[in-house]
Image (tube, grey):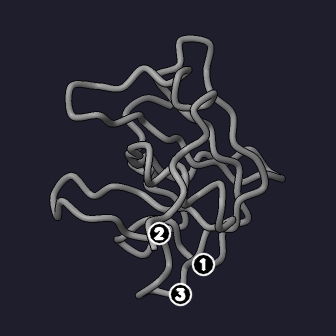
Amino acid sequence: MTPAALDPAIAARLKRDPAGLVAAVIQQHDTGEVLMLGWMDDEALRRTLAEGRVTFWSRSRQAYWRKGDTSGHVQLVRSVALDCDGDALLVRVDQVGAACHTGSRTCFDNGLIG
């Protein structure tokens, strides 16, 4: 059975890069903490919306990966918003465990200024 496609009304609003991807900023829903950045194509976004767990397209592995399937550090979707240009998503989540593959809570703990 073929899975349903992304809602055409949503797909029409996306401005994808040449690889067909849209940046997805992942944010802790209650604190506003920015946790990570990932990439989604239409199918990854469809899975995220349908399953309530964040799915990304891995540019390095060229495969889908659902955050937490191997680590247990899941991202439970609270909301998804598209920016005004249609080229970035804001996914607000309940983060369980570390968001970063290094084991850190956030991928943005390497300050350059401040």
Residue that appears at 47% across and 69% down: 104
Drawn side of residue 1 relative to residue 65, left or right? right
Q: Quadrant of the N terminus?
A: bottom left
Residue that appears at 48% across and 71% down: 67
Q: Are marks 1 and 2 in contact (CB under 8 Å)?
A: no
Drawn side of residue 113 relative to residue 106, left or right? left
Q: Earlier in the sequence, mark 3 or mark 2?
A: 3
Residue highlighted by disc 1:
97
- Mark 3 or mark 2, which is nearer to you? 3
* Crowding at mark 3 (Cα within 10 Å: few <14, some 14-19, many 20+): few
Drawn side of residue 100 relative to residue 62, left or right? right
Q: Earlier in the sequence, mark 1 or mark 3?
A: 3
Mark 1: secondary structure:
loop
Drawn side of residue 3 relative to residue 48, left or right? left
Q: Nearer the viewer, residue 106 or 112?
A: 106
Residue highlighted by disc 2:
104
Q: Amino acid at mark 2?
A: Ser
Q: Earlier in the sequence, mark 1 or mark 2?
A: 1
How far apart marks 1 and 3 lie (CA) works out to 8 Å
How far apart marks 1 and 2 lie (CA) works out to 9 Å
Which quadrant would residue 60 be assigned to in this image? bottom left
Residue 92 against residue 48 in the figure, above or below:
above
Residue highlighted by disc 3:
72
Residue 28 against residue 32 in the figure, above or below:
below
The label on residue 79 is none
Mark 3: secondary structure:
loop
Q: Amino acid at mark 3?
A: Gly
Q: Nearer the viewer, residue 84 or 26?
A: 84
Q: Are marks 1 and 3 in contact (CB under 8 Å)?
A: yes
